[in-house]
Amino acid sequence: MVENERLRQEMRRCEAELQELRAKPAGPCPGCEHSQESAQLRDKLSQLQLEMAESKGMLSELNLEVQQKTDRLAEVELRLKDCLAEKAQEEERLSRRLRDSHETIASLRAQSPPVKYVIKTVEVESPKTKQALSESQARNQHLQEQVAMQRQVLKEMEQQLQSSHQLTARLRAQIAMYESELERAHGQMLEEMQSLEEDKNRAIEEAFARAQVEMKAVHENLAGVRTNLLTLQPALRTLTNDYNGLKRQVRGFPLLLQEALRSVKAEIGQAIEEVNSNNQELLRKYRRELQLRKKCHNELVRLKGNIRVIARVRPVTKEDGEGPEATNAVTFDADDDSIIHLLHKGKPVSFELDKVFSPQASQQDVFQEVQALITSCIDGFNVCIFAYGQTGAGKTYTMEGTPENPGINQRALQLLFSEVQEKASDWEYTITVSAAEIYNEVLRDLLGKEPQEKLEIRLCPDGSGQLYVPGLTEFQVQSVDDINKVFEFGHTNRTTEFTNLNEHSSRSHALLIVTVRGMDCSTGLRTTGKLNLVDLAGSERVGKSGAEGSRLREAQHINKSLSALGDVIAALRSRQGHVPFRNSKLTYLLQDSLSGDSKTLMVVQVSPVEKNTSETLYSLKFAERVRSVELGPGLRRAELGSWSSQEHLEWEPACQTPQPSARAHSAPSSGTSSRPGSIRRKLQPSA
């Protein structure tokens, strides 16, 4: 009712205004848009008049400035006249001095010849004559100095006269420039005054014409307003009805909004509970599948055999020479890739291994037989991969490869780091690496400060039966690049020499030891796996390789250690109670890899040419003996740990030496880690 009363009062006021407008049809419309625009045009006209007045003020200022410049020019002309007068006086004075100087010089020249003549002709005989002569010489010298001084003064006066002429020319040029600038300013001032006058007249005319047009439009709009006011009352009643309806709807809107919010909150809570339950179920299924995958993988490796043997035949190269001895004596079975045939002394001999690779096989093909073992290492098993064969059969190429085509070592470590990165959300891993070689039955650290230092293999004092090497340097690595730096440094310290069979023959057994320690972030389970990558020295016949002196001793030690490896394999094959691991440093160090708690892969490198059939036959027979060895089930090194504090992420070595020892196997001390070289600067030893 109040709103209706207000609308009625507003309608009466509009009718009163309408009657007033009808009473004064010819008068101007107060508050009209066009009257406001007319007022704006008047204000703009007054503003233009003010700008014109300001322009006239600026013109008067320019006139005053022109007058000041004119007065200044007059002063400059007076000063110039004074300077010219002073210059004339100075020139006259200088000319008088110049004439006096010329007269003095002429008189001196007139007096000087007798003196010179006397100096040259008179012979001094008495002291008085000598004194008079010296006085004459002194006076002559004084007169010459005065003449030089007068000449210098004359030169300076001439320079001053020349500078005064230059100053006069510059002053005249400045006067001419000032006069031209004054004329230009006067012309610009006249042009600006004329343009301002024209702009003022043009603006007045445009404003007057625009005002007339707008007044006509105002009268036309006024007639339209009168017509619109007649139709205002029905529209006003319609708006009142709409307003009342909207007001009723607004009163009920808060209740509808609260009810909708309650229903949405209930739906969101139910959806969140469903998502949480689904996440818990998915996590449980993921962990179950992960355990099942590990179980199936280990079962697959166990079925294949703890010691698997593969053979790789290298291609015939130009180093093999030409003729009957360089012919190919190795053939393959087209239906079975585990059979290899050797033609030895005219008789074919066949061998069955786990896998045989022809010379056309790539590095990737060989690695596919290896990558399952890398996963076992991450799961906590000891894994050993070693290459066996005669000198020049390609063991180092298979294990190390080239930068463009890497071998097993590089590919295994790349797979290792990729697997660790994939499990980074659930597991935390620490990877350490060591490098050693066995040369002449001496174990040496290839990454140590003193590579020639002899190391010994010891049993851990904790009674676990595990082996460790006191003093062996161990580095913690974060990527494959870090291990490549270890490769590069260790390769420079490895012993290689020239023989008749190979230009760069490996004269030692090289071992790369990678230890992977992991912890499950959710369960606290800790695992420890060790990956041994071994490049054995080449077996060879001493007479054929041409070894003499130190090379002969090296060959004897190599053959002895490989023979000890054969004895260990024979003892394991026949299940003897005592296995002679301690007969050689090589077999003693590989005891973990050849016992029941490890998974081992042996790559037998074979030379295909006729002249090497004896060594090839021996290598393949040894491979068959190794393949027939059956070890016990692989033992996973895992233990449960807590996740209560950050300290449980720190790994301690499996065994430690007593305190008096120089170095521990887990890491070098601060004193041993300061070895010069790039590898020490770029890699930090593990803690």
Image: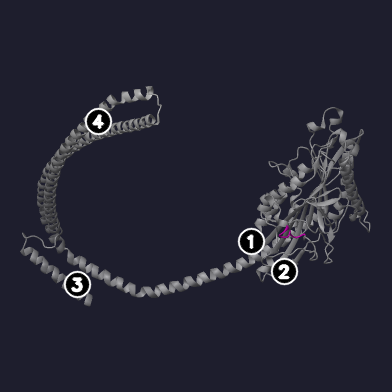
Q: In this orientation, which residue lies closer to the viewer: 563 or 125?
A: 125
Task: Name the residue at 82% across, 67% down.
Answer: 462
Q: Which mark is residue 641?
A: 2
Give the CA distance from mark 3 to mark 2: 84 Å
Q: Amino acid at mark 3?
A: Leu
Q: Which mark is residue 425?
A: 1
Task: Name the residue at 66% across, 71% down.
Answer: 644
Residue 90 sits above or below residue 575 on the image: above
- Mark 4 or 2, which is nearer the eye? 4
Give the CA distance from mark 1 to mark 2: 18 Å
Q: Mark 3–mark 1 contact, CB under 8 Å? A: no
Other-residue count near label 2 (Cα within 10 Å), few / some / many at <14 / 14–19 / ≥20? some
Secondary element type, mark 2: loop
Q: For mark 4, what is the residue?
A: 101
In what quadrant of the picture does the C terminus appear? Answer: bottom right
Q: Amino acid at mark 1?
A: Ser
User: Chief secondary structure of the magenta span?
Assistant: loop
Q: Amino acid at mark 4?
A: Ser
